[in-house]
Image (cartoon, helix red, strand yellow):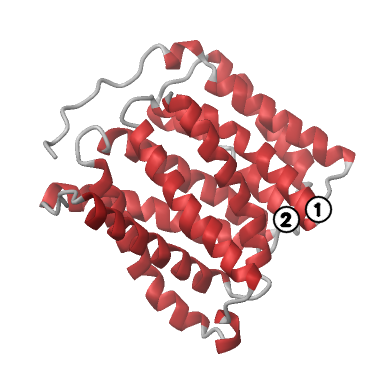
Amino acid sequence: MPRIALLLTTLIWGATFPATKAALEQIPPLSFLFLRFFLGTVLVGAWFVVMRRRFHCDRAVLAASAIATVFLFFGYVLQTVGLRYTSASNSAFLTALYVILVPLMLRRFGGRLIVATAIAVVGLWLLVKPSASMNVGDLMTLGCAVAFAGHIVCLERFTRRFDAPSLLAWQMTAATLLFVPTTWWEQAPASAFVPTAVLLIGLGITGGLATGAFAVQMWVQQIVPAQQVALVFASEPVYAAWLSWYFLGETLDLQGWVGSALILLAVVIGAFDRQTQSQPPPAEVAQPA
């Protein structure tokens, strides 16, 4: 059941790529992220009120949330700003490299993962066609993959020690506050915030549905090892590429499709490493709700 739920949420993560890409035609990236996380914070806060859930705010929870938020913040900044300079499909496929980075960070790897990394490098070369003037959006998206991998690793540890809903609420709140000064720095015109259909749909998917997907991910990571979570997320680029083709009319040439296929093959090989999957981290005692 947890893996099925995570697979369904991956469709939402995939949908955020074309939704964000379309919204960025109207609003600057950091201002969009502020609105996205502000909406998510409001929804999470409303859930606490409706469910009459206890909100944990002790020092340990705050410290864990702060560490996770750093990875979350830089992941979204690099990914969203990078989307202004690269395609939604490229962004999705490059972000998927965290499927290999997660077991590397956790030191759960073997010979298969080394092979997977080599295949991923070849696939990445074919997909982004790097040169002396490599697309800055592709480089930023690679940085976001590292940040998201760090965030997944943090969630595996923290959601098993602390109250997951409180961790979610603190991360959403902290991210919103971090984006406040960035909106001032961008100085977006008032027209950027006009509630057009594109902007409202983009916020509905990224701030509404994706916040729910984030909550499901945090619940699942209390049960499922991080490398298996990353494995399920390997389907995200497939969703994103299809949705980008259907809604944005984006295409990949033959070399790009071959590179994409190699990256997917690499992430599946790396995430299916039996040695790493057979050694999930021991669950820690959670705090009482």
Up/down of 70 relative to 42, above or below = above
Name the image quarter holding residue 215: top left
Up/down of 128 relative to 121, above or below = below
Q: Which mark is residue 206?
A: none
User: What type is the residue that disc 1 sits on?
Assistant: Glu
Q: Residue furthest front?
A: 50
* Foreground residue among 205 and 238: 205
Q: Counting residues from the N terminus, which is met first, the one under dot 1 or under dot 2? A: 2
Packing grade of label 1 (10 A; few <14, some 14-19, many >=20) is: some
Left or right of residue 153, residue 273 in this image: right
Q: Residue at x 88, y 38 (%)?
A: 254
User: What type is the residue that disc 2 sits on?
Assistant: Ser
Q: Residue at x 44, y 75 (%)?
A: 182
**Percent x, y for residue 214?**
42, 46
Q: Which image quadrant: the N terminus?
A: top left
In space, the residues marked 1 and 2 are separated at their CA atoms by: 8 Å
**Percent x, y for residue 49?**
23, 57
Name the image quarter holding residue 276: top left
* Foreground residue among 111 and 45: 45
Secondary element under disc 1, as helix, strand or loop, is loop
Q: Tell me if I can see residue 83 in this picture.
A: no
* Foreground residue among 45 and 51: 51
Residue topped by disc 1 = 250
Residue topped by disc 2 = 87
